[in-house]
Image: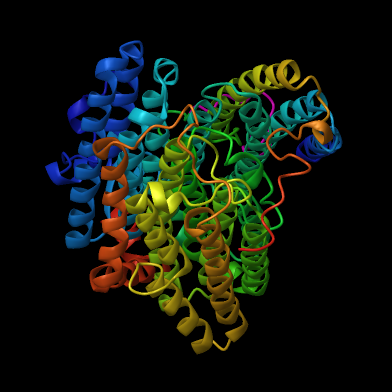
Amino acid sequence: MEALMSVLIGIFFVVAIYLMLSKHIIRILLGVAILGNAVNLLIFTTGRIVHAVPPIVPEGYDVPQEMTANPLPQALILTAIVISFSFFAFLLVLAFRAYQELETDDTDEMRVAEPENPPVPPLGY
Amino acid sequence: MAAASPHTLDLSKALVTQAPALADWLVIAPVVLCIVMGAALLIIRKRADIQAGIAIAGLVALVALDGALLVHVAETGPVTMTMGRWLPPFGISFTADLLGAMLALASSFAALACGINGIVDIDDSGKRYGFYPFLFLMMAGVSGSFLTGDIFNLYVWFEVLLISSFGLLVLGSERGQIDGATKYAFLNLVATTLFLIATAYLYGIFGTLNMADIVEKARTTPGAPLMTLASLYFLAFGMKAAAFPVNFWLPASYHTPRVVASALFAGVLTKVGVYALMRTLVMLLPAERAELSLLIGIVAVLTMAVGVFGALAQSDLRRLLGYLVISGIGVILSGVSLASREALAGAIVYMMHSMIVMTALYIASGIAARAAGRNLSIATLAGFYRSNPFLSALTLLLFFSVSGLPPFSGLWPKAMLVKASFDAGQGWLGAMVLLTGFLTMVAVVRVWALAYWRPHGEVADEQMPERTAPAFATCYLPLLLLTALTVGFGLFPDVLIRAAQTAAQGLLDPSAYIHSVFPMGGAR
C-alpha cells in the first residue's frame, strides 16, 4: 500500500513541478496547489497505512495489539491543509490582481518592479 | 475504564504536574503579547488616531519581555515550557536558549524602530488596512520561530510570519508592489513547502517532532537517511534566507513595499531563515552538516559575491540595500559552513548586527526619500548633504557599519569569522568575507559620494512637491536608537561576543537544551 502511495505521490510531485516551471501565473498557481496536496499525502503515508483498524488499546494492555495507523500525521495534515488553503486563497487573489494591474500573467513581462532599462548612473563625479 | 478511580492514576507519567515558575512564563510571553496586540489592533484598525500609540506601547512591552527573557536565559540556561502540560515529546515545547532569546531581542528592537517610523511612513489608509496588526502578527511568527522547541511548530510560525508579511508587502496595492509580491509569495511558499516535506520525512524517520528528542534520536538511529533530511532543510532554509542560487525573490520584491515594511523584512525575515538553518543543521544534524560543509561554504561564497556585485550594479539605494542583505546572508553562511565555536559565534553576532543595521539603513533611506521628495537614486539625486546634513552624517555612520569598519558593530563578527576560517585552514572563506567587506564599502561609499556629497548636478531641489522635513520623534528617534545600538556594540562588544560564544556552544553541545526539555533525563 505504501509503495502504491509513493508512486502516486511521485506523480503528484512531477505534475506540480511541471506546472510550476511554466511562465504563466495561473499554471504556477495550479502547480502550487498540487504540490501542497502531494506533501499532504506524503505526511499521510509516513503515519503508516492500514485498513480500518481502530487505534484502541484493549483493556489490560499498554499498547494497541494490532498495527494501527499513527493519528498524529493526520493532525499535522489537518494543520497543513488549513494553511495551504489560506495561502492558495491569498495567491489566487494576488494573481488576479496582478493580472488586472499588470495586464499579463506571463512572468517574463512582469517587469514593473525591476525595469529592463533602469536609469544610467553618472559616469563621473 | 471510567469506573477506575482517578486517584489511582499516576499523572506524573503523562503530565507536567508542577505549575511552571513565574519567570518561565517569559518563554511564551512575547508570542502571547504579539497575538493579543495583533487581535486588539485589528479591532480598532479604523481608529488611525489611537492605533499608533497603543502599538508602540505594545512594542516597548515586547522589547522589555524579550530583554527579561534574555536575562533569565542567560542566568539559568535554556528554559522550557510545554503546552497543555503533556510531558515532552508529546506536548509542544517552547524552549528558549541563548541564541533564540538574543535574536528575539534584536528583532524586537527592529520592530520597535519600524513601529515608530511607521507613524509617518504609512499613510492613514495603510493604517486602516492593518499595518500595525500585520506588524504584530509577523512579530508573533518571528518570536515563535525563535523560541519554539518543536519542528512542526516552527513550520507553523513560519507560515504565520509569511502570511503577515504578504499583508505588509501589498499594503497600498501599487503596481510595483503587486509585481514584487507575486514573486515573493510564490517562491516563499515553495520554500516553506520544502520545509514541510523535510519535516514529514523527519517524522517518518524518528517518530518525534521535539527538537531535543530529535537530537538524541539522530545520534542513536543507525542507517537513517539523514543526508536527505539535511539537504532538504538546507535547500528550504537557504531559499528562505535568500542564499544563492535561490535568492532571486529578494531583490525582486524588497524594494517594492513601504520602506518600513522593507526595513522589517530586511532586518528580521531572512535572519529567521538562517536561524532555522543553524538550528536544524548545526544542532539537529551535526554529522550531516559536516559532510555538507564544503557545499555550504561554496554557497556562502557565491551568495556573498552575488550580493555585493549586485549592490555595485544598482543605482537605486533601496535596491542596493536588498543586495546587501543577500551578501550579509553569505557572511553568516560562512560561519555555518565552518561551525566551530568561534565561527558560529561570529555568525550569531553578525546576525544581530545585520538585523539592527539593515533595518536602520532602510529607515534612513525612507526618511531621505521623503525629505528629497523622490526615490533615492544616484542617477537623479545629488547634493543631499546640503539640505540634510544630520541625516547624511547618520547614513554615513550606518554605511561604515555595514561595510565593517571600526568602531561599529560590523567589524567584530567579520574579524571573528576571518580568524575562525584561517584557524580551520579554510582561508578562502575568510578572504571572501574580507573582499565582500571591501566591495560593500565601495558600493555604499559610491552612493554617498554621488547622491549625498556631489556638489553639482540636479540638487535635491526645493520645488519638489512632496518634500516633508523629517520630524524628530518619528524619524530620527528610531534611527538614533538603532545607530546607538550599532555604535554601542562596536565600542563595547565584550558582552555580546561572550553571549554569542555561549549560544554557539549551546548549539554545538545541546546537552543543556536537552536537559531543559527532559529534566528527568528522558521521558522514554
Res B4 quadrant in image: top left
Residue B110: tell me if it is visible: yes
Judge by depth and name the residue closer to the eye, B177 or A19: B177
Magenta highlight on residue A51 = yes
Residue at the location (30% across, 35% down)? B116
Does B416 lie within the magenta span?
Answer: no
Quadrant assignment for the N terminus of chain B: top left
Percent coordinates x, y for residue B464 in the rendering: 50, 31
**Is B67 on the left or on the right of B412, as rendered?**
left
In the figure, is residue B348 to the left or right of A69? left
Q: Which secondary structure type mostly characterizes the magenta part of the structure? A: loop
Q: Identify the magenta region.
A: A44-56
**Residue B287 in picture, x, y percent from top left:** 57, 71
Say whether residue B87 is visible: no
- Comparing B336 with B381, the one in front is B381
**Res B22 → quadrant:** top left
Give coordinates of residue A96: x percent, y percent.
71, 16
Image side of residue A8 versus residue B216, left or right: right
- Return the residue nearer the eye: B205 or B116: B116
